Amino acid sequence: MTTTHPSLLSILALVVLTAIMPCQAEFMVVLPDSSGLVDRPQNGFSNLARTDPAEQRAVYETMAATGNAWATAIPDVCRGRWHGIECMPDRNDVYHVVSLSFGALSDDTAFPTCDPAHATLSPALLHLPYLRSLFFYRCFSGDHPQQIPAFLGGLSPSLRSLILRENGHVGPIPTELGNLTSLGVLDLHGNKLSSSIPQSLQRLTRLQLLDLSYNQLTGPIPDLTNPTLNVLDLSHNFLHGQIPATFGQCDSLIKMDLSRNRLIGSIPDSLSNLKSLILLDLSHNSLSGPLPSSLGKLISLRALLLNGNYMSSATIPEDGFAGLKELFTLVLSNMGLQGPIPESIGELPSLRVLHLDGNKFNGSIPQSFQRLEKLSELRLNDNRLSGPIPFSKEMLWRIGRKLRVYNNPGLCYDASNGRSEGIDSMSGISYCETETKRVVVGAASASISGHQTKHLSSRTDRGPPSRPSSYAPTHGSGILRLLVPITGFLLSVLPLL
Ligand SMILES: *[C@@H]1O[C@H](CO)[C@@H](O)[C@H](O)[C@H]1NC(C)=O
Ligand SMILES: *[C@@H]1O[C@H](CO)[C@@H](O)[C@H](O)[C@H]1NC(C)=O
């Protein structure tokens, strides 16, 4: 599925913003700590202040290794700062390098770029003992793909943020990265990393963001129990095994994206502890049913995507999602779900995008869907739904082409809502004939219905009528359900009387 949803995008933008912010030097919050650095604005650079000479050499080497030898001409790197180096003084007015960044992130955040043919990560980085942030974006992606060097595990113990995004890195994630126990951000997104995720990452107990998405990682997901973690993105890999139940202990999680892996087993009930979770994407795995009703306890959830997990014949629990008052996006496409669509889904007040297509849902579209006033995208296509489509013409116009109801043999459009000509999404959907005619002969049918009930109930024993468009809504009272086919019957007989 390649469509994008505006509402989902806004959430992703928020989460991506959280992800991007720590790597932009101007947003980096450098907290005072025990390292003896003085946290103050750097414009009052005194004449006596000098960059630590050993660190200065390390910066020259690091810059040269990326193809930025021009930096060697700068006599004092903290004084002649470029966009991409941050320094802080200690009490003796000696400046220390706290942040190095590379790569053209955006027009207004252009860090030194790397020479794609020759750039390497220099071990000189080990001589920057005050380093808190290291950022490389699209740096080593030339003809000679590089591994993430194990020596990075020996970087400053005060390193808070290690970001190696879209650098073409190959090979495993070095176990040694588990030594960087102050890390708050570890972002290795968009490389070609393989092998399994090292268990040593469990030692990173201060992590707030772990993004290993868009790699080729295999093996099981380590048991993370990290209470500080806000963003976990392991999507687009080849991870297998089950979703660890310990994730329920990561109770600060805002975003959990495990989509497009090969995960199996059921969705652990423990995830219901994640009261801050805004985005849960488990789509395109091989997870099995049932759909846990505990998902309804994720009260902050705005986007829930489970599509593409074939949960053979699971049903949606009647009040399964009833607690999700903030939910914008619910995607349950192509899951083999069956049974009725619960009325409770229509009670979700914030819902904007609802995809229930490609399942085996039967019965009628819940009447409650009329109350989904914010809905801008609805897919019900390719199910076994029947009965009248319960939407006003206004709602049909509002949703426009983002309404998909096709390939439900029993659905019909109730012409008493206004003719549907010109409404794209209704093309191929016939009018509910019996519904229309009920209006015409309403009085007659009411007076005769009691008489005919017996006849029709014996008819239902023989299976559904051959013309699907005469199906009645199944959510009405039993009498109403029978009444509608009766009027159809009457209409065919009346002219003969
Ligand atoms: C880092 O971790 C590895 C194993 O995970 C260990 O062997 C090594 O001694 C640690 N220390 C450094 C400085 O890399
Ligand atoms: C829907 O499907 C289920 C299982 O296949 C069946 O038991 C139920 O009677 C069906 N309901 C309707 C309204 O057709």
Image (cartoon, rainbow, N blue to C red):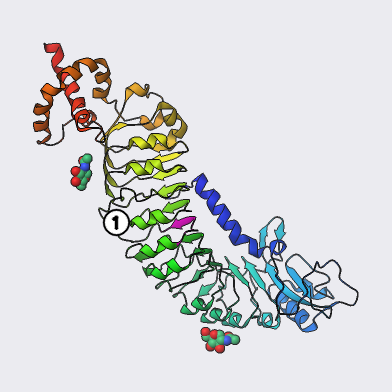
> In the rendering, at what x and y percent does residue 464 appear?
16, 35
In this view, the residue farthest toward the right is 47
> In the rendering, at what x and y percent does residue 296 appear?
39, 53
Q: Please indicate, yes or no, whether residue 141 appears anywhere in the rendered image.
A: no
Camera-side residue: 36 or 430?
A: 36
Q: Going by the image, does 444 lie left or right of 306?
A: left
Q: Which residue is mark 1?
A: 311
The quadrant holding residue 491 is top left
Camera-side residue: 401 or 29?
A: 29
Residue at x 41% of width, y 59% of height: 282
> In the rendering, at what x and y percent does residue 84 appear?
72, 67
Q: Going by the image, does 385 lie left or right of 1?
A: left
Ligand 1 quadrant in view: bottom right
Camera-side residue: 109 or 274?
A: 274
Relative to 484, residue 352 above or below: below
Bounds of the magenta segment: 274-282
Q: Please indicate, yes or no, whether residue 418 appears anywhere in the rendered image.
A: yes
